Image: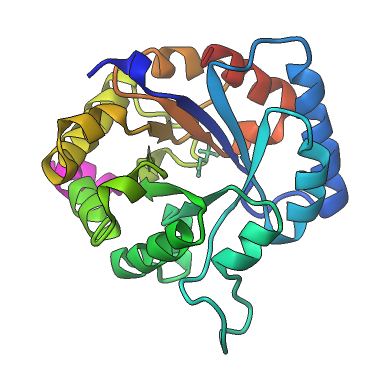
Amino acid sequence: MNKQLRKAVIAGNWKMNKTPAEATELINAIKAELDGKKTDGCEIVACVPYVDIANAVEAAKGSPIHIGAENVHWEKSGAYTGEISADMLKECGVEYVIIGHSERRQYFGETDGTVNKRVHAALEAGLKVILCVGELLTEREQGVTAEIVAKQTKIALLGVTAEQLKNVIIAYEPVWAIGTGKTATADQANEVCGAIRMVIGGLYGLKAAAGITIQYGGSMNAKNASELLAKEHVDGGLIGGASLKAPDFGVIIAAAQ
Ligand code: PGA
């Protein structure tokens, strides 16, 4: 399972932060941070609020930064007030979309079933998916972390073909580590990312398992990124808080080179 086979992906998840004007500023600041530095060792993504997409895409033009969204609806169009379709995102220049983030699951009733529908809609529209899975603190304490992430992964990927899987990244995000400053240890992150890789192996075979990018997310920052990213099964990061500070995000990108 050679780590070198896989492309590292460093993705920012801005959550509900930054107005459109601030989005332009932050993308420009990240560009300045990357200027003259090596960036081809990883794919760089900024997942931004819907209303920031146009500005972010414009500001990122000609840079190595790819733009993502933070969610997508599963229907192509129709009476779904307040929702955004995959085709709408695609037309705006979005390349990636986060699906199944724990905040969506926790506050907005997202289930493994709706995650699966969103994954299909995104892939069919030609978007790349960052699929989030992760256990609650109680589940970790109960010793069922591997079972929880396996269940989330399997249901999210129901009906997804091996060809489509090439456009899926999985982000392992222990819920207790998100926004808490409490990072999983590098060994904990590696263990669960490895377990997810085994699940992919069981579903799609060893080649697919060896090729899929699995990120860690949850209080990854400029200080702990290199230790986490050095682990065999950790192929990148999904970064919340630290992705809002260009210098910190730059350090994390440098750590992935
Ligand atoms: P955090 O968020 O880095 O602020 O913990 C990560 C995430 O929710 O994707």
* Residue 15, position as x, y percentages in the image: 61, 51
Q: Nearer the viewer, residue 20 or 86?
A: 86
Give the left or right position of residue 161, taking residue 240 as reference: left
In the figure, 86 relative to 246: above or below? Answer: below
Total numbered labels placed on residues in the image: 0
Give the left or right position of residue 53, taking residue 197 as reference: right
**Residue 167 visible in the snapshot:** yes
* Residue 157, position as x, y percentages in the image: 27, 55
Residue at 51% in and 70% down:
73
Span shown in magenta: 133-147
Residue at 38% in and 23% down:
6
Give the left or right position of residue 124, taking residue 201 as reference: right
In the figure, 175 relative to 82: above or below? Answer: above
**Residue 105 visible in the snapshot:** no
Q: Is residue 139 magenta?
A: yes
Q: Is residue 82 magenta?
A: no
The picture quadrant where one finds residue 217 is top left
In the figure, 41 relative to 55: above or below? Answer: above
The picture quadrant where one finds residue 40 is top right
Residue at 37% in and 32% down:
213
**Quadrant in which the N terminus is drawn:** top left
